[in-house]
Image: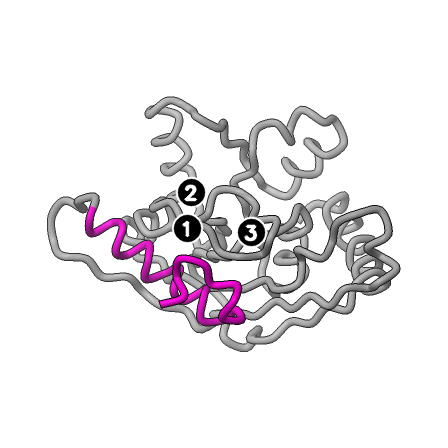
Amino acid sequence: MKISVRIALAISSVLYRLLLSWTVSGREQIPPEGGLIVVANHVNLTDPVLLMLAFPRRITYMAKEELFRYPVLGMLLRDAGMFPVARGGTLEQKRDIMRRAEALLNRGHVVALFPEGKRSPSGTLLEAKPGAAILSLRTGAPLVPVAIEGAHKIKGRWWWLRRPRVTVTIGPPFHLTAPEGRLVRSESARLTSDLMCRIAALLPYERRGPYAG
């Protein structure tokens, strides 16, 4: 990890400790090596940094393309190994993104995804997309479910005066299994629901949304 990223994370860690009352549980469940796919709910812009501070291993993200247009932020994202994703990209662009993620996992990296594809300001789970499930099946990499609770309170001008409580809960790694042959849409939906239910189980019931059952 480049020095610029280390400095940014160190500053973020100090700020988060000052402005938030946040805790992490489940670190001991993270395998020390090998490719991993981290799947987490997405509530706030701070989520990626929270995950990077919570994990003992380096995490790589797919970040939306617009963020790379800001000079300083774009530099930090590239230094951290992030790669841009265009919203509504072509089929070939989406395939290229999947190939890059597969290559990272096959080299033993940790790739983090937010299966919902966008933030949920209320903190309640949204319907997820199948990318994480497909990536896991293609590479054989285990998935690590993570629940971020309380980040929805980080909003408004004076949120920091309340020092909101935020928890990051890491669940046990797991594998998805699918019948041999082509992954049909219905099976993809079932597997995506499976992984989202793992995240939901780490959240309070009222935050589980469509995965409460």
CA gap between label 3 and label 1 equals 22 Å
- Number of marks drawn: 3
CA gap between label 3 and label 2 equals 19 Å
Q: Is residue 154 left or right of residue 187?
A: right
Q: Residue at x 33, y 25 (%)?
A: 91
Q: Residues within 10 Å of mark 2 (few under 14, many from 20)?
A: many
Q: In terms of image quadrants, where is residue 211?
A: bottom left
Q: Residue at x 84, y 57 (%)?
A: 160
Residues rendered magenta in the picture: 186-213
Looking at the picture, does residue 195 appear above or below residue 2?
below
Amino acid type at image mark 2: Ala
SS of the residue under disc 2: helix
Q: Which residue is mark 3?
A: 42
Q: Tell which circle, 3 or 1, labels the residue nearer the N-terminal end.
A: 3
Q: Which residue is mark 2?
A: 101
Q: Is residue 155 left or right of residue 119?
A: right
Asked whether disc 1 touches disc 2, contact meaning CB atoms under 8 Å apart, the reply is: yes
Q: Residues within 10 Å of mark 1 (few under 14, many from 20)?
A: many
Looking at the picture, does residue 69 appear above or below residue 124?
above
Q: Position of residue 140 (x, y in %)?
A: 30, 57
